[in-house]
Image (cartoon, grey):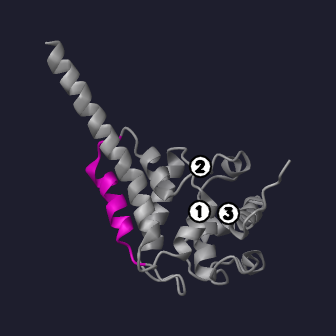
Amino acid sequence: MKTEEKTREQAFIERIEQLDPGELAALRRGCGERDPVEGRCPWLHGIIQGVAREPVAFLVASLMAQYSTATIRANGHRLEGNFGVTWKKAIAGTDSGSIKRRFHILLDSDYDPFTGDGDLPYRLRQMVRYAAAEGIGVDWPQLLVDLKFWNHPDKHSQKRWARSIFAYERTENAATQTEGETTNHAD
């Protein structure tokens, strides 16, 4: 039997999942801070261990902490796929244009992984809270990788996220049109 070797991102996420409830609460309260020391989480420096720049690692850890400790312990905070998959599941059945527009705005958000500056952390935090409230998880190791490369000139992360959600919208629209045509032919 071949064992799969963990990536640094997976190991980091598992270390965050093992934090005690008080440490997760500190991350939750410190959410939005760009510096773990300022956010009352100096112990996070020992967990990061080169997985990503501090602002990126802290952002992902504080986003994960938006899920309850019980949800984290039960692995209800996890989902396979990029954040586009998370968002399409979170908004499934929602007709609100403003909720759907959030994703478009997120894709255009600025983020500096060296300093943590930009509007991406704020927008992503809102969307993760929404997903958590809907009981939808996130692929945390993938999110960490995607945020590390957010500013790549080819916009790989943004394109993957967009493909995930917009392919879903095209499929839904095609299914709706097919149903309409079937109904019209039945008349």
Q: Nearer the viewer, mark 1 or mark 3?
A: 1
Residue 79 is marked as 2
Residue 17 is marked as none
- Please tell me whether residue 126 belongs to the stretch shown in magenta: no
Residue 25 is marked as 3
Is the residue 73 above or below the residue 103 in the image? Answer: above
Q: Quadrant of the C terminus?
A: top left
- The residue to which callout 1 is attached is 142
Furthest residue toward bottom: 115
Magenta residues (range): 94-110
Disc 3, SS:
helix
Distance between the Cα atoms at labels 1 and 3? 23 Å
> For the residue marked with disc 3, what is the amino acid?
Ala
Which badge, 3 or 2, comes first in the chain's sequence? 3
> For the residue marked with disc 2, what is the amino acid?
Leu
Distance between the Cα atoms at labels 3 and 2? 22 Å
Residue that appears at 59% across and 50% down: 80
Q: Quadrant of residue 176?
A: top left
Which badge, 1 or 3, comes first in the chain's sequence? 3
Q: Nearer the viewer, residue 70 or 85?
A: 85
Disc 2, SS:
loop
Which badge, 2 or 1, comes first in the chain's sequence? 2
Residue that appears at 76% across and 77% down: 43
Residue that appears at 41% across and 75% down: 154
Taking the image as shown, residue 171 lies to the left or right of residue 33, namely left
